[in-house]
Image (cartoon, helix red, strand yellow):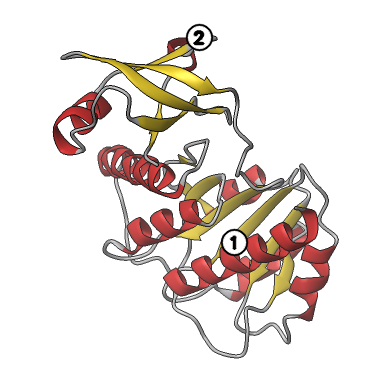
Amino acid sequence: MFHFFVSPENVTDTQVTVVGGDVNHIKNVLRMKIGEKFVANDGNGASYCCAISEISDDRVVADIEDGQLMSNELPVKLVLFQGLPKADKLELIIQKGVELGVSEIYPVEMSRCVVKLDDKKKKSKTARWQSISESAAKQSGRTVIPEIHEPISFANALKVAEDFDLLLVPYECADSMSALKDKLDNVKPNTTIGIFIGPEGGYEESEIEKAKAAGGEIVSLGKRILRTETASIAALAICMFNIESNLL
C-alpha cells in the first residue's frame, strides 16, 4: 500500500487531505481512483489507512477507515553523525539510513574529509538530502520523515551528542564486536543513541581522543575495514536488529 505524508492540520477525525506534489503523483503517476486505499502519515508518528473519496486539481481527500495504526518506528532514537563523504555517497547513506530507522542525520566536517562546502552549497545540498529522506520514508513505510541537518564541525557534533544516552564510535582499531553487543543489549526504550562514522580517510587520532573524552564508546563493526558508506549502513543495521530483537 502506498504511503503519503500530510500536514497534521490536514487531518481531521474522519478525513485527510493531500496537497502539493503528491496530488500529481496520485493522479497522474499512480493513476489512483476513487475508493483506492493508501496510508497517510502526519509526520509526527501517527498513520491512518484511508480510502480516496475526492480527487481534484489541487487536492486529494480520503476518508479514514482505520484509526491510528501501530507505529513501525524504532523504540529508541538513532542519530547518525556521518563524516562528509565524496560524490553522492551521502545520498545512498541517507536512503538506506532512513530505511533502517535512523531519526536524524548530521553530515560532519572532519579532518580528513575531502569535500568542502560553502554556505550556499550547504543549503542546496541539505534541501536535496531532505528530499531523499522524504522519498525513502514513503517507500519504507516510515511514519516520520527523518531530519537531515546542514553539515556541522566535529566539535559541534560532539556538543549535539553530549546529552545522548549512548554514543557509539565504530573504529577500525577497536578489538572486537563484544563491546558493541554489550552496549546494545542494555539499551532501554526511549533512549537516544548517537553513531559517529568517519569519512573516507578515517578518523584522525585526535578525533578519537576527543570522542572518548565526550563519553564515546569505541567499538568494532568486524575484522574487515569498511568503506564509509558501508560502515554507516552496517552500524545502523546492527543497531536496528539488536534493538528490535530485544525491545519489540
Which residue is denoted by mark 2 in the rendering?
Answer: 12
Ranked by sequence position, the earlier of labels 1 and 2 is 2
Q: Quadrant of residue 40?
A: top left
Q: Is residue 184 left or right of residue 186?
A: left
Confirm or deny contact between disc 1 and disc 2 (CB under 8 A). no
Q: Residue at x 23, y 24 (%)?
A: 23
Q: Position of residue 163 (x, y in %)?
A: 75, 43
Q: Is residue 60 visible?
A: no
Vertical arrangement, residue 193 with respect to residue 178, above or below: above
Label 1 vs label 2, nearer the camera: 2
**Which type of secondary structure does the marked residue at label 1 adopt?**
strand
Q: Quadrant of the N terminus?
A: top left
Q: Quadrant of residue 3?
A: top left
Instruction: Please rate how many residues cluster around mark 1, counting C-alpha atoms within 10 Å: few if below 14, some from 14 to 19, many from 20.
Output: many
Q: Is residue 96 left or right of residue 172?
A: left
Instruction: Please rate how many residues cluster around mark 2, counting C-alpha atoms within 10 Å: few if below 14, some from 14 to 19, many from 20.
Output: few
Q: Relative to the observer, which residue lies in front, 214 or 103?
A: 103
- In the rendered image, the residue lying farthest to the front is 35
Q: Position of residue 77 (x, y in %)?
A: 66, 45
Q: Relative to the observer, which residue lies in front, 182 or 51?
A: 51
Q: Residue at x 38, y 47 (%)?
A: 139
Which residue is denoted by mark 1 in the rendering?
Answer: 196
What is the three-letter code of the residue carrying label 2? Thr
Q: Relative to the observer, which residue lies in front, 207 or 220?
A: 220
